[in-house]
Image (cartoon, grey):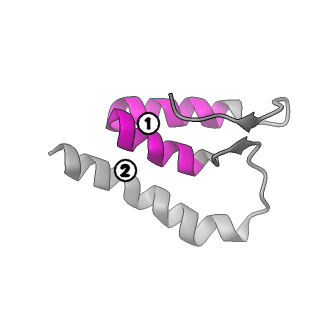
Amino acid sequence: MNTIARTAVRIPIRAYQRFVSPLLPRTCRYYPTCSAYALQAVHRHGVLKGLGLGAWRLLRCNPLTDGGYDPVP
C-alpha cells in the first residue's frame, strides 16, 4: 500500500518536471529544486511527512529568501 501511495505522489511531480517545468523560467532559489526536494522527501520519509516537507519548501521558495543548498533532512 505504501508503494502505491508513493507512486501516486511521484507521478504528478514527475509530470510537472517533464512537461511543465521546461516551459517556465528557472526561478527556484534552492538546490535541489523544489520538485526534486519533494521527490526525495517522499522517498526518504514517506508520503505524509514527505508532502509536508515539500509544501514547507514551496512556501519558503520566494523572492524574499536567499535560497542555496537545502538538502532533505
Judge from the rendering whether residue 55 lies leftward or rightward of residue 67; answer left or right: left
Q: Please give the name of the residue rendered at 30% of the width and 55% of the height, measured from the top-left corner.
A: 7
Q: Which mark is residue 9?
A: 2
Q: Which mark is residue 60?
A: none
Q: Position of residue 21 (x, y in %)?
A: 65, 64
Task: Classify mark 1: residues with Cα within 10 Å, few (<14), some (14-19) or many (20+).
Answer: some
Q: Residue at x 61, y 33 (%)?
A: 57
Look at the image and say whether residue 55 sits in the magenta stretch. Answer: yes
- Indicate whether residue 49 is drawn in magenta: yes
Name the amino acid, label 1: Leu
Q: What residue range appears in magenta?
A: 35-59
What amino acid is labelled 2 in the image?
Val
Dot 2, crowdedness within 10 Å: few (<14), some or many (≥20)? some
**Residue 37 against residue 11 in the figure, above or below:** above
In the image, residue 15 above or below residue 43: below
44 displayed left or right of 63: left
In percent of width and height, residue 39 lies at 46, 48
Quadrant containing the N terminus is: top left
Classify mark 2: helix, strand or loop: helix
Q: Earlier in the sequence, mark 1 or mark 2?
A: 2
Residue 2 placement, left or right of 59: left
Q: Which residue: 58% across, 35% down?
A: 71
Q: Residue placed farthest to the left in the image? A: 1
Q: Position of residue 32 (x, y in %)?
A: 63, 46
- What residue is shown with label 1? 51
Q: Quadrant of residue 51?
A: top left
Label 1–label 2 contact, CB within 8 A:
yes
Main secondary structure of the magenta stretch? helix
- Helix, strand or loop at label 1? It is helix
From the top left corner, tell me how far across and down residue 58 is, in percent: 63, 37
* Structural distance between the alpha carbons of marks 1 and 2: 8 Å
